[in-house]
Structures are given as C-alpha cells and as structure tokens.
Amino acid sequence: MIGVHAPEFAFEQRIDNVRQAIGDFKLTYPVAIDNNYRIWRGFGNSSWPASYLIDAQGRIRYHYFGEGNYPQSEQAIQDLLREAGSNISAAAPIVPDAKGAEANPDLANIHSGETYLGYAQATGFSSRESVFAGAARDYSVAALKLNTWGLSGNWTVGAEKAILNQPDGRITYRFSARDLHLVLGPGADGKPVRFQAVVDAKVPGPDHGVDIDADGNGTVTTTRLYQLVRQSGDVEERTFEIRLFDPGVEAYAFTFG
C-alpha cells in the first residue's frame, strides 16, 4: 500500500500538515508528496480519491475514481493476490469500520456537490452583494434555493478561500445530503475560532456531525475538513448556517456525503 498526497489547496502543500494528518488517521503505510502533480499527471488521474491496483508485473490492472465500490475493489485485490501465487481463499468482503467524516457516503441521497468558496471556482453564490475579489466587503444573505449559498458579515473572498475580517460572520447553504462537511482553518495567527452551526434555524440535536455537539457548538483549531451535519433520519432538503464568533477563520469548500 502506497498513498499519494496531491494537494487541492495551498495549505495541503505544507509537509507539517501532511505529517499531522498521517498521525491523526494513524496511517502506517508510506505517503508520497505530489505537490507538483507529476504522479497525478503520470497516471492521468482526475479525481480525489482514486485507487489503482498494480499486479506483480507492475501493470495497472484495476482503477476506481471516487468513493465507494469497496466490495468490488476488495475482490480485485484478492484476485490479483491469487494470480501472483497466494493461497488466499475467497472471503466475504470486509465492511470498513469507518466513522465520522470517513464513513461511506450515502450516495443514493446526495443531491449537493462539492462547492468552493474562493472566487476562482465558486458556484452557486447568492449573497445580495456580488463578490469583490480580494478585498474586504460586507455581505448579506436572502432566501436561498437548493445548492446556493451566501456570506453574511465582513469577508475577503480570495481565489481559494473566504476570510472573515470581523466577529460574527455567517455562511449559509441550502443543501440536500445526509452529511455536510466544511473545510475550515484558523487565521494566520492560529487562534481558535468558536462557532455554532444550526439546521433550519434550530440546533442540530441528533443531526449533529462529529465536530460539533448537539447544540451545534464547535471550535476551529486546525485547517481540515469538519463534519457539521449527519442527518439521523430521512434525508431532506435543509438550510445550514454556521455562525463564526471570532474573526480570522478561513473557509475553503463544502463537501457532502
């Protein structure tokens, strides 16, 4: 097993951040750093994540782009091991014991897609004010349609992230998926940022993600993906809002599961 880390955002290029993530996830296999995308391009890759199986002769025999397909991937591993001379017997696929944001996505109920907050790739932006790229501006949000979002408060929207300049900023998103995640980080000074998340203007209760409590409270301490919503019942179209009490937070992208 060899991992390849191809960064999507600038903060993911920092080796210390990669080391911390390897430790947090307790990874024991080597991870190559592909900051210049040479491995990515060499494989003709187009997705995070992507899986490749290479046989004993060094040939790529199987690949899969995206999450899921775990039983088929494991069957392909077993087939290649036997082909290479292993006496491994056929076994039922192992169900990964993943928790929190690592858990399998509910693919049948995802109706919202990855959404970037930086102006270079942003889609669905629906604040009353247009984006003033790279400079501070006050924003406000009206009613949202599905898969639209907006900022409230004083923000600077950069190419790949939005930075909150003053206390009490908000991000609102109308989504439809079981899980909602948001990539967040503290400001340049590294000070923690307190926040509260609500769903349909109420505390999330049993629908809270692993990075907040039932009242929606949490703290941004490091730059990473935060799981903020995991609907415990039927998946419905909902309005998510995060209120950030402290300035400096950096918001990168929403993802859904």
Image: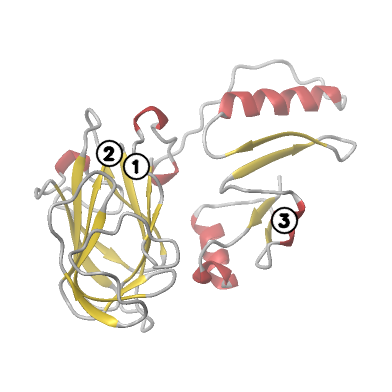
Q: In which quarter of the image is the C terminus?
A: top left
Q: Nearer the viewer, residue 193 or 143?
A: 143
Residue 88 is situated, as x and y percent measured from the top left of the image, at: 76, 21
The residue under the point 41% across, 31% down is: 107
Q: Assign a secondary structure to mark 1.
A: loop
- Marking on residue 233: none
Kind of residue at disc 1 = Ser
Contact between marks 2 and 1 (CB within 8 A): the answer is yes
Kind of residue at disc 3 = Arg
Of label 3 and label 1, which has the lower sequence position?
A: 3
- Marking on residue 176: 2
Identity of the residue furthest to the left in this view: 202
CA–CA distance in space, label 2 to label 3: 33 Å
Dot 2 alpha-carbon crowd within 10 angstroms: few under 14, some 14 to 19, many 20 or more: many
Residue 13 is situated, as x and y percent measured from the top left of the image, at: 58, 70
- Quarter assignment of residue 118: bottom left
Identity of the residue furthest to the right in this view: 57
| Residue 127 in the image: above or below residue 16 | above
- Marking on residue 41: 3
Picture mark count: 3
- Quarter assignment of residue 146: top left
Q: Which residue, given by chain and number where applicable, does mark 1 sit on?
A: 112
CA–CA distance in space, label 3 to label 1: 28 Å
The residue under the point 32% across, 83% down is: 135
Dot 3 alpha-carbon crowd within 10 angstroms: few under 14, some 14 to 19, many 20 or more: few
The residue under the point 21% across, 63% down is: 127
